[in-house]
Image: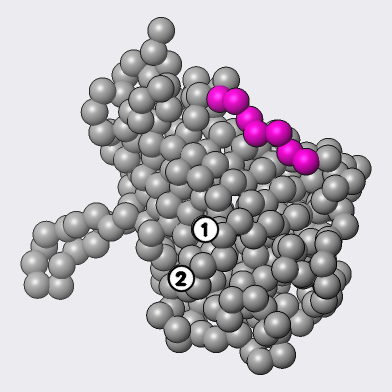
Amino acid sequence: MDIVPQINKKTRYTQEMEIYPYLRDHHFEGKVILPAVETLIALANVVKLNFPQISINCLLKARFGRFLLIAPEKQRLEILVDIEDAGNNNITAVLLTSIKSKKSAISRALEHARVEFGAADYAPDPAPPFRFVEKLQGSCISVPSVTIYRELVPFGTAYQNIIGDLSVSREGALAYLAGGSGEADENLLGSPFVLDAAMHAACVWGQRFTDIVSFPVGFEKRVIYQKTKKGGSYLGRIVPVDAKKESLIFDVWIYDLNGAIFEIIRGMQMRDVTQGRLNPPQWIKA
């Protein structure tokens, strides 16, 4: 039987997000932007509320097409979520906001992110054994986390979740990641801070070896085996798959410190979205 028989056309839901103080630590060029990891939680929340039979531990074909800016005076943010049948017992969720034209009362919807949620029995990918990923091959440098968040990824305290030194070589990056804190929702997809910090490690790798400051613009698949927790400690291994100048592709594996796999991300895509306005400092370049 079809797991989503009631989705035979696009359905739009309206949701209000509370803008907690910690979100304002995620800023870019002086503007607060909703993190990609938070957009995934917002989409998962609408799916779980309206289609509780859908599994949300397998996320496919995620795309983060446009920053969602949070105005300084905003305490709550109204978002729109479109849900449609993606076939094969999967559904697609799209996050949008509505804006009004300055010249008329006509509103239009802007798409910020989309992701497909896979069926519960979607086959997960095997992860490499912990002993193969806890040591980084090749000529490494170590970058202290305090330097990362001062000079390379200058976010506020809530989003400074690489712990200790980040190891970086041409083979990838290896980092200890904190589960963070604050009012973030960890019940749906786990703590957002862990994957967010893994993205920071990928950004540092790109600054060293490709001379660009990159931001996440999507991934092909994310499988959550166990949910990361706020206050927890994890190990993240970032593996470059394709390091073209205009687009960087990584695989990411996240383990706890006992070696248990918590999640994998395949085909995480990072890109310079500033058209060259930001450049890495000279000292980080290989």
Q: Quadrant of the C terminus?
A: bottom right
Q: Which residue is mark 2?
A: 246
Report the amino acid beneath label 1. Answer: Gln
Q: Which residue is mark 1?
A: 269
In the orientation shown, which residue stands out farthest toward the bottom?
282
Q: Give x and y (percent) for residue 260.
A: 83, 38
Q: Is residue 129 in sight in this rendering?
A: yes
Residue drawn at the location 34% of the way across and 35% of the way down = 83
Labelled disc at residue 249: none
Q: Is residue 150 in sight in this rendering?
A: no
Left or right: 127 in relation to 102? right
How many tags in the picture? 2
Instruction: Give the vertical position of 211 relative to 103 (above or below).
Output: below
Q: Quadrant of the N terminus?
A: top left
Judged from the image, the secondary structure of the residue bearing numbered disc 1 is strand
In the orientation shown, which residue stands out farthest toward the top?
1
Residue drawn at the location 40% of the way across and 31% of the way down = 91
Chief SS of the magenta region: loop
Judged from the image, the secondary structure of the residue bearing numbered disc 2 is loop
Instruction: Give the vertical position of 75 relative to 118 (above or below).
Output: below
Q: Give x and y (percent) for residue 238.
A: 70, 57
Give the residues in magenta: 122-128
Q: Nearer the viewer, residue 209 or 283?
A: 209
Left or right: 284 in relation to 97? right
Left or right: 75 in relation to 101? right
